[in-house]
Image: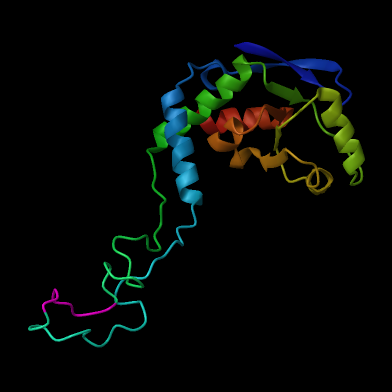
Amino acid sequence: MAVADVFDIQKNKVAQVELNDAVFGAEVNEAVIYDVVKMQLAARRSGTADTKTRSDVSGGGKKPWRQKGTGRARSGSSRSPIWRKGGTVFGPHPRDYAYSVPKKIRRKALISALSMKFKDKKMVILKDFPMEKISTKVFQNVVDLFDFKKALFVLDDNNDVLLKSSRNIQNVKMIRSEGINVYDIMNCEHIILLEPSVKKIEGALLV
């Protein structure tokens, strides 16, 4: 098993923790990471784009001219798609872009993303994050001390003090271990795990 250092919020090494190689030391599969990130982004699309077909455009109820005898091409509506102010052909309509990939692929992608961060030394484990009251300044000082540019904090439980202390800080996101996902991991530079969340993540991915 790999061993990782555990720090306090003063950046002092206070302990070490063993990491399961099946979760944090696995072979990185970039293809499955791509597939799952693509799935997550597709699910986030609003799908509200809409265009008007010839039946939706106002007007055009009257036949522009008689069928025969004018020397012109026959026409039944001034809202034909080939006419100015006509309807749109094959335009977008509201739809759901979401789709799913197999559960095994999602699990493999999450393990690959975690392993990639660990191998690239972009994963930091904190013993805890003690804060008695909400303070954006205190939280920002910790972020600056570790030089986190774009950080994802993974908590083991709900912590309103941490959540409210970090919500006004740019490029910092807080999630619980149950909500950890491939897109958020790949979208950050550093992932910061509170020590209790490590075992929760391993327990969820090794079932």
Q: Nearer the viewer, residue 38 or 197?
A: 38
How far from the left and from the top, in percent, is residue 193?
70, 29
Most extreme residue toward the front is 71
- The reply to whether residue 32 is in sight is yes
- Tell me what residue is drawn at x 67 percent, y 41 percent: 175
Is 123 on the left or on the right of 15, as rendered? left
Q: How many circles with numbers are drawn on the protein?
A: 0
Most extreme residue toward the left is 69
108 in relation to 51, above or below:
above
Q: Which of 22 and 114 is in front in this view?
A: 114
How far from the left and from the top, in percent, is residue 70?
12, 82
Q: Is residue 11 magenta?
A: no
Is 202 on the left or on the right of 140, as rendered? left
Q: Nearer the viewer, residue 112 or 146?
A: 146
- Where does the magenta region start and end? 71-78
- Tell me what residue is drawn at x 26 percent, y 73 percent: 80
Is the stretch drawn in magenta largely helix, strand or loop? loop
> Dividing the picture into quarters, in which one does residue 191 lie?
top right
40 in relation to 119, above or below:
below
How far from the left and from the top, in percent, is residue 60?
29, 83
- Tell me what residue is drawn at x 71 percent, y 29 percent: 192
- Tell me what residue is drawn at x 60 percent, y 32 percent: 185
> Dividing the picture into quarters, in which one does residue 180 lie?
top right
